[in-house]
Image (cartoon, helix red, strand yellow):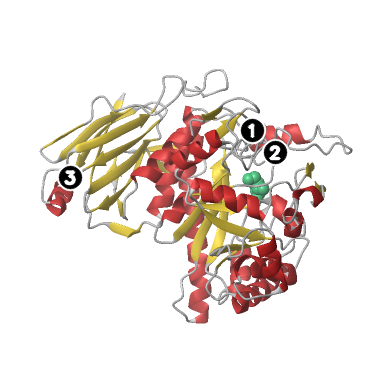
Amino acid sequence: MTIDATGSLDPRREIADLGRRLFGGFVEHLGRHIYDGIHEPTHPSADADGFRTDVIDLVRELGVSTIRYPGGNFVSGYRWEDGIGPRDQRPRRLDLAWHATETNQVGLHEFQDWLDKVGSELMLAVNLGTRDTAEALDLLEYVNTSVDTARTRERAANGRARPFGVRMWCLGNEMDGPWQLGHRDADDYGKLASRTAKGMRQLDPSIELVACGSSGRTMPTFGAWERTVLEHTFDDVDFISCHAYYQETDGDAQEFLASGVDMARFIESVVATADHVAAVRKIDKRIMVSFDEWNVWYMDRWAEQSVSYRPDEWPVAPRQLEDRYNVLDAVVVGDLLITLLQHADRVRSASLAQLVNVIAPIMTEPGGPAWRQTTFFPFALTSRLAAERVVEVPIAAGTFPSERFGDVATVNAVATIDDDGASLFVVNRSTTESASLRLDLSALAAALGHEPALAETHLIHDEDRYAANTLDDPERVGAAPIDDAGVAASVLSFTLPVVSWAAVRLT
Ligand code: AHR
C-alpha cells in the first residue's frame, strides 16, 4: 500500500544555523579501533607513521568534524602521560573497562597527527573516574599552553612546540553509570566537575566544557542527575552530554524505526531540565546539548560475548563490539541524523559512536581491505549535503502505533538551506507502506528567485532490509539515485519505499 505524504519546504521556518560539530565522531581505545583499525604499520597502505591511508580516505569521505577521544569507558582509567614520550618506553597497562591490554603505542601526539591527516578537530575527555582536578589541569597545560613551563617543554621535546589548541573538553565519561570506573552520585560528580571546570577555565578561559549527563534516558537517575549536576556546574560548563544507543529487539523492526522519537524526547527533556535550572537561578544562559555518543549498537550481543572472557585473559586489540549493520540500521541512523538536525538550536555538538571497527561505519581487515558499512551512507550524505541553516519540514503522512511512544509520524523530514539551494533529508519509517511524497517548494522558489532544480538524489533502501556489506561482499549495499524524483510547478515529488531514507539536493 502507498500513503500520501505532503508538506512544504519554507526557508522562513528556520530552526538554527548549522554547527558542523553536529557531524562529529568518536574514537575510543577499544577493540580494534586504534590498533589494527586506524593504525596498522604493517598494512600495505600504511604511511610513514603507521596509519592506514585507505582508512584515512574513508574517514575524510565520511565527513566527520570533531572527534571525541580517547573514551568512552576507557578514559575513566586512563593515564594520559602513558601515551607520550618515546614509544619504546611507554608502559603496557590493563584496560579495566574493556578487559584488554593497552600498549600505549598510540597516544595524544599520534592521534593529533592522524587528525591532521583526516582534517578533523580534536575533542578531549579527561579522566574523572580514577583521577581528579590536578591531572586534568596537567593535561590541559600540556595541550593548550604556550607559556614556557616544564609541561610545555616536555610537549616540545615530544615533537609539538606549538599548543594543540583543543577547544572542547568532556569532564569525564558516563559518571552516572555503575559500570564506570569511579562512578559516583550526581552530587559528588557535580562538585568534582565544578571544581575541575573552574580550574581548567583559570588556566584557559577559551575552552568549552561538557558536563556528563545521563548515559541513557532509561537510567534510573535520568532527569534528577542532570538537574543536580547542573545545579553544581551551571556557571562552569557550556554543554551537558546525552548518550543513546538503539537496536532492533525481538525482530520488531517497526518499534526500532521509532528510535528517532526516543532521541527527540531525550533531547527535549534534557533541554527542559537545563532551562529549569536556569529559571531557578533567574539567568538567561542556555546550556547546550553535546550528544556525544549515539548510534545503533546491538548491546545484547556484546553482553553475551563479554561473559565468555576468562579473568586471566587481557588481549591486545581483540575483536570487540564489531556490529555488522544492515539497511534497516542505516535507515534508523539516517532518521537519528534528521532528529539531531531538528534540534540544532540546542544540540550544538554530536558524535557518532564510533568510527572504525567498533560499532562503526568503517570496517577493516588486518592486512586486508577497508569498507563502508550501510550506516556510512546516511552520515556521509548528510554531512556533505547539509547547508548553512536548518529548517523544519512538517510532513502530513499519518502515524503508526508504537508501544513506547504512542502514535509516531510515519514520515519524518528536515532540510537545510543556503543561498544556492536546499538539501532535504527524509525517512519513511513504515515497514508496510510506501509513501508518495509531494513537497511544495514555492516559498523556496521565491527565496531563490527561480524554480529549484534537482541536483542530486540518493535513496537507501533494499528489498532485503537485512542486507549488509561484508568482507566478502563489501559493496552489496549503497545509496542509489531516486528513479522517479522530479520537480514540476514548484512541487518536488518522489516515492519513498518501505523502510527507506533519502537525501535530495535542490539548487
Ligand atoms: O561506545 C561504547 C561505550 O558506550 C563507551 O565506551 C561508553 O561511554 C558507552 O557506554
Q: Residue at x 57, y 31 (%)?
A: 45
Estimate how packed mark 1 is, as few (under 14), some (14 to 19) or many (20 or more) residues with alpha carbons within 10 Å. some
> For residue 462, what is the image quadrant?
top left
Q: Earlier in the sequence, mark 3 or mark 2?
A: 2
Q: Residue furthest right?
A: 312
For marks 3 and 2, give the CA distance.
47 Å
Residue at the (66%, 57%) spot, across then down:
173
- Amino acid residing under circle 2: Gly
Q: Taking 454 as reference, is 234 left or right?
A: right
Left or right: 96 with respect to 264?
A: right
The residue at which mark 3 appears reads as 441
For numbered disc 2, what is the local secondary structure? loop
Snapshot quadrant of residue 441: top left
How far apart are the two marked residues, 1 and 3, measured between alpha carbons?
A: 42 Å
Q: Nearer the viewer, residue 178 or 386?
A: 386
Query: Where residue 397 appears, x then y in whole percent?
Result: 30, 38
Location of residue 56 with respect to 160 vertically, above or below:
above
Residue at the spot 77% in from the left edge and 45% down from the top edge? 102
Residue 322: numbered disc: 1
From where the camera sits, is residue 426 visible? yes
